[in-house]
Amino acid sequence: LHYLLSNMVLILPEGWQVYSSAQDAEGRCVCTVVAPQQSVCSRDARTKQLRQLLERVQNMSQSIEVLDQRTQRDLQFVEKMEIQLKGLENKFKQVEDGHESNIARQYRSIKEKMEELRPLIPVLETYKADALLVRQFKEEAANVTDMLGNLQEQLGGLDYQELHSRVMSLEDRLKACMQRLACGKLTGISEPITIKTSGSRFGSWMTDPLAPAGDNRVWYMDGYHNNRFVREYQSMYDFMTTDNFTSHRLPHPWSGTGQVVYNGSIYFNKFQSHTIIKFDFSTSLISRSRQLDFAGYNNMYHYSWGGHSDIDLMVDEGGLWAVYATNQNAGNIVLSQLNPNTLQIIRSWTTNHPKRSAGEAFMICGTLYVTNGYSGGTKVYYAYSTNSSTYEYIDIPLTNKYSHLSMLDYNPRDRALYAWNNGHQVLYNVTLYHIIQ
């Protein structure tokens, strides 16, 4: 992770440290790695046992290496000894079969052979020592096996609740760390992660960025018109692995794929209208509706893929937004920040980008990012900042794995892009140029 620090006080969660840092050309501090302290786990008794285990295994490996080297070296002596013993055996046979006149000469030859064999005696002693080393190795292996058994019993004693509690604690610390990051500029998009393959070619899916801790529900809407049923999955895991869901019936069909779930309500564009509806899941009632004045609808100013995508609702760190086009702005994109309670427009920005030429769009930290298309080679190539009311052309590749994007939205809680790609529900991680404050 690379973070830019400028005029700031950096407060890290307990147990985290700046691993290394440097200064850029302008004298600002750039942290190259932020990681948990390596000493945190050293206090864990089980970690100490594992470290001791590794050391003992390494010692055994060294012993095996020594034994192997000795065996290879001594094997050469054994092979030589075998040849000499065979020669000695032949000599004795010659003595038994030969004449008396040859006995003295034959025994002198045997004596010479015995002298040649004498250096092999220390080799046999070495083999005895190696045999002892092998026995020690077996004892060491038995000790390690016992240690593994004890460790396994200890790990087996950790119940699911304790493990789950540790995971949740780590996740909370990670989220707390992420919340300390101020908004940043998009600099990269990861390869897609396919979560599920389901539904038709078009649709939308999402999680609630303002959901309370522990609420990880997934919301799923198949199609872009003439449908009013929203599926609710209890968790991302349930969404990935099962078809168990609760169905919510909306009072009106939706238009396009630009719906968002925000703080317990779903916001959607009513089919064949420029009306935005806020529907409360807890009461199953419409809590607010309002017309988005002058906004094109019914495929007047859709994204380049069509699909009644005239009005695209989205959420970022700053709140609720609507992206659309009007005749007054010559069909170019208009960006409006909405009050999530009243649906009134807080402020609007007019851009110079034609709505029909945009493949998809999403908001991150008050900046609208637009893709150059929805099929084939895709990239994010246009960015409009509401903070400065300026735009720029950029070049950030977006892997379009399944060749037809019909929904692309940013979730500020997950800091990820949710996409519907030709009947596949996909996630992208994003890289932001952060300023830590």
Image (cartoon, rainbow, N blue to C red):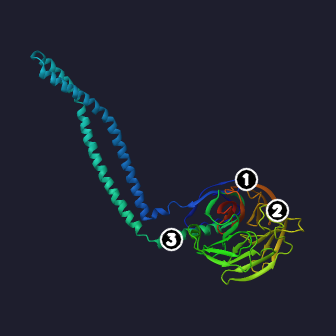
What element does badge 3 sit on? helix
Name which residue type carries label 3: His
Q: Quadrant of residue 264?
A: bottom right
Q: Earlier in the sequence, mark 1 or mark 3?
A: 3
Most extreme residue toward the top is 101
Q: Mark 1 highlights which residue?
A: 377
Residue 24 at what x, y percent from top left? 70, 53
Q: Mark 2 highlights which residue?
A: 356
Which image quarter is the N terminus in?
bottom right
State if disc 2 and disc 3 touch (CB < 8 Å).
no
Q: Residues within 10 Å of mark 3 (few under 14, many from 20)?
A: few
Above or below, comparing residue 88 to residue 244 in the picture: above
Q: Quadrant of residue 146?
A: bottom left
- Inter-mark Cα distance, 3 to 2: 47 Å
Most extreme residue toward the left is 100
Residue 105 at what x, y percent from top left? 15, 17
Residue 104 at what x, y percent from top left? 12, 18
Above or below, comparing residue 423 to residue 338 in the picture: above
What element does badge 2 sit on? helix
Which image quarter is the C terminus in?
bottom right
User: Which residue: 82% across, 67% down?
Assistant: 299
Q: Which mark is residue 217?
A: none
Name which residue type carries label 1: Gly
What element does badge 1 sit on? loop
In the rendered structure, the answer to whether residue 233 lies left or right of residue 164 reads: right
- Inter-mark Cα distance, 1 to 3: 41 Å
Name which residue type carries label 2: Arg
In the rendered structure, the answer to whether residue 49 lies left or right of residue 181 reads: left
- Inter-mark Cα distance, 1 to 2: 18 Å
Q: Mark 3 highlights which residue?
A: 164
Above or below, comparing residue 249 to residue 385 in the picture: below
